[in-house]
Amino acid sequence: MKTRRHILKSSTAMIALPALESLGFRRFASAAAAAAPPKRLVFLGFGWGVTDETWFPDIKTPGPDYELPVGLKPLGRHKKDFSVVQGLWNKYSVEGHAGSTWWLSGANKFAQPGQTMHNSISADQVAAEQLGVNTRFSSIQLDDSSGKSGGHGPGLSLAWDRNGKPVAAFNDPVKAYHRLFSSDETPIDVQKARLAEERSVLDTVLENAKSLQRGLGKDDNEKLNEYFQSIRDIETRLSKEEKWIGVSRPDAPIDEPRSGLQGKEEIRLMYDILIAAFQTDSTRVITYRQPGGQTLLDSIGINVHEHDMSHYITTKGEKLAASQKRDLTQSELLAGLIDKLKATKEADGSRLFDNVALAYGSNIRTGHHLTNCPTILTGGGAGVKLGENIVVPHNTPLCNAWLTMLHGVGVEAERHGDSTGVLKQIIA
């Protein structure tokens, strides 16, 4: 049986036959259409930690037969499809109210002599460098629309670039929606001219910086090299924008969000945008530094201050009740996101859930406690173990989990942050 395309010949033309099953083309077309969906990576981070006593499963019952704690009860219908990982931390963490700044990087804040603030590349940006080559957006960063970073620490999002500099985010669901799905009505020749002008400015800046470099000392040269890397990053962004000039944005699979929503409803909207971005393959890497402080508390009728809530241990009472209600709300929202990931179908008939690797958590456990970072892993995209209470040795590097997830979605990386290797306990 021939497997090449059959051709009908005449004296003037050659016309390809359609793929007839009788000629051995059975299901060829459907097989081509059902190419394996891409892997996606998501990190959802919150500040202020969780309620220690009611969020974590009992470490004495590891495995699948653990009892779901009160704080995770809304996730009950998905119990077989997520795992809680206990025992992870970032060993260099020293900031009691920075739930996100070093969460995905594992960096040492004081690694650079003479500097009081240092960071390194976050796990999402490592993935974006490889998974983002063929998408319009290498990665998408989402953030709290209130503009407050309470419980998160310094930064513009969860993401930090290869120089350890903060990566900006969309902090409004409406703006994120239009960036993803609204067409740029600017004429193509004007868009090209704008990019050419930006390149010209970059060339001039680069030439001047290289002239300045001669005669500088070691420390100044290191700073200038960081500057050169920033220039190269801008050049990469311009090249990507140039590549997508004239390519229409996809039709939005969701309606335009209402403006002005904050807290609980904003998180729900951002989760919808996250799914829409994956549905349209606009990106394959997303982070969301979500509100877990005052904007969330206000939206669910809690009158306790976010900082006071995080220190419920000293006084209990209404502060403890606020912390527990916050946990239930966040678990309810996460459960709703998993519902939608499972309900969204891929081209090959699989679920979006099956091709997403999602980490949910914080760098803070509770109060100022930075060990045993709350960590939930879900989605089938990275081949991690689901449905279990996974207890790893005390103070295992959190970056071991991130390295394992990177490998699971096909990202080549020898190490990440302070990792010591992959976390075998979470591999299915």
Image (tube, grey):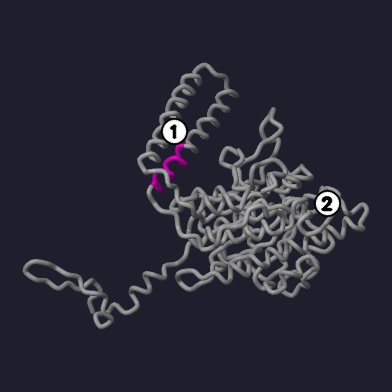
Q: Residue 38 location in percent, x, y?
A: 48, 62
Residue 121's place in the image compared with 382, above or below, is above
Residue kind at label 2, given as amino acid type: Ser
Residue kind at label 1, given as amino acid type: Glu
- Magenta residues, as a range? 235-245
Q: Residue 197 location in percent, x, y?
A: 41, 32
Q: Residue 250 location in percent, x, y?
A: 45, 58
Q: Nearer the viewer, residue 52 or 344?
A: 344
Q: Is residue 413 visible?
A: no
Residue 319's place in the image compared with 54, above or below, is above
Q: Quadrant of residue 43?
A: bottom right
- Earlier in the chain: of badge 2 and badge 1, it is 1
| Residue ranking furthest to the top | 215
Q: Which residue is mark 1?
A: 198
Task: Name the side, left or right, on which 264 lies relative to 252.
Answer: right
Q: Which residue is mark 2?
A: 310
| Quadrant location, the N terminus | bottom left
Q: Secondary structure at mark 2?
A: helix
Residue 30's place in the image compared with 127, above or below, is below
Q: Residue 361 location in percent, x, y?
A: 70, 56
Task: Name the side, left or right, on which 136 lies relative to 365.
Answer: left
